[in-house]
Image: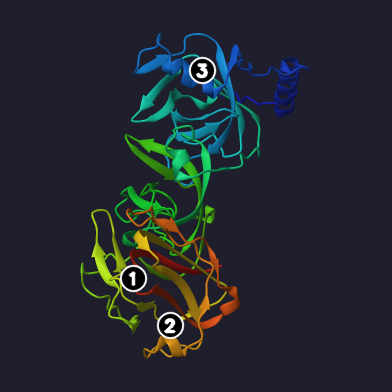
Amino acid sequence: MKKTFINIGLILASLVLVLSSCIHDEFDEPPIKEIPIGVVLTIQDLYSIFMSDSVASTSYKFVDDFSVYAVITMDDKSGNIYKAAYVQDGTRAINLHLMSSGGLYEGDSVRIYLKGLTLMDYRGMMQLDSVHVDNNIVKVSTLKHKTPELVTIDQINTGQYLAKLIKLEDMHFIEEDLGKTYANKEDLITENRTLEDELGQRVFVRTSGYASFAGNKIPTGKGSVIGILGKHDDDWQLLIRSTSEVKFRDAIITVNFDEIENGVPVDLEDWENYMEIGSLSWMGYVGTTNSSVRIIGDGQENSTWLILPQLEINKGVLEFRTRAGNLTGASLKAFISNDYDGEGNAENATWTELPANIATATSSSFGNWTHSGMIDLSEYNGQVRIAFKYVTETGQSGQYMLDDILIYSE
């Protein structure tokens, strides 16, 4: 048998020649996808198109080249939204319903190519449907974060802030939600919690059970909240991006008298319902919309105190609401003391009147609920008692109602 000897050197030399013949000085580059710009619109233009007489009320599909420039104000990184993002320009804001999750980040400045997208109203929320991040989005720059707009709940109700990044101040969660978490993280259930302002107006905070902060406890106290304003049918909803944007001051005491008995003298633990002069007491009152405490004059001389439990405060702030009716000389004032012993005889302690806004009314009608303002208690650090004193002279009368007492640290 003949043996065949392979010349390894010859094979290697041949391979070098073959490979050399295949090498080019210029490399082939993958084709760059050109996404047309077309006519540039604003987000306000999108709302106008949808509301125009020529568009069906359910949806509108773009078939020509149009673009919108905007900034991403919320992405789905936290898990509070899924396959979605919110964008905003200098006019309005809108939701993007994405074909797949990811790829867009808060602060991205983008151009949205509208051809093939459907503009629609989903249960009150305006959105662009079936957005493909690669085919419909051109990233222009990053870290172009929008500043939230400071608004009130009255302004929310105008509808002009739909899908926008907003900030609400002087808000608190209702007592029924305290102690709960933002959502049910264990069972991945989306839930609503309720924010309330000093006028009793409310807005939901809606949180997905998949949100990274779903299991966090609802904060006590009062403060500011930043989020995206959403809508579901008739309900306004705030979508929080991070709990770091919920900045609350710690609550020392929150009282809304929800458990008060109607027509029964106030007898809460460690409170004092003290009649200095006369026979009037502060009484529980359960109305059609809320519970409170009230006192009604009888035309006689009266001086009646409602004194809260002893509190330890440090740079505290006091807020409450009052309402008055049929006033003929009666007065209500708020006081603070650091030497009241809690044994009755309030007149023996040193009381300082607090600069509160107290409700007023005519002799023949009721006024509106009035917010006291944010009353600075920083001069009274340590153990104190807060009190409300109702006073009438002979021949004077009138009714005062008191509710939503909140004391918190600054």
Query: Circle 2 — which element?
Result: loop
Picture coordinates of residue 47, whole percent (x, y) = 47, 21
Q: Residue at x 43, y 17 (%)?
A: 50
Residue 171 position in % (x across, y down): 46, 55
Q: CA distance from mark 2 to mark 1?
A: 34 Å
Q: Which dot, 2 or 1, sits closer to the camera?
A: 1
Is residue 300 visible from the viewing direction of this image? yes
Q: Are marks 3 and 1 in contact (CB under 8 Å)?
A: no
Q: At which x and y percent is residue 198?
A: 44, 55
Residue 380's disc number: none
Nearest the viewer among 229 and 360 is: 360
What residue does disc 1 label? 395
- In the rendered structure, the answer to whether residue 291 lies left or right of residue 10 reads left
Q: Residues within 10 Å of mark 2 (few under 14, many from 20)?
A: some
First along the sequence among labels 2 and 1 = 2
Q: Amino acid type of disc 2?
A: Gln
5 or 309: nearer the eye? 309
Question: Which residue is label 3 attached to?
Answer: 114
Q: Residues within 10 Å of mark 3 (few under 14, many from 20)?
A: many
Q: Earlier in the sequence, mark 3 or mark 1?
A: 3
Disc sitting over residue 310 in the figure: 2
Circle 3: residue type:
Leu
- Residue occupying image coordinates x 48% and y 41%: 228
Q: Nearer the viewer, mark 3 or mark 1?
A: 1
Residue 187 against residue 141 in the figure, above or below: below
Compared with 384, 83 (above or below) is above
Give neighbour class at mark 1: few <14, some 14-19, many 20+ (Cα, 10 Å): few
Residue at 34%, 62% (x, y): give it. Answer: 175
Say which residue appears at 48% left-offset and 76% top-offset.
335
Find the distance from the CA under tag 3 to the CA under tag 1: 74 Å
Asked if residue 77 shows in the view, the reply is no
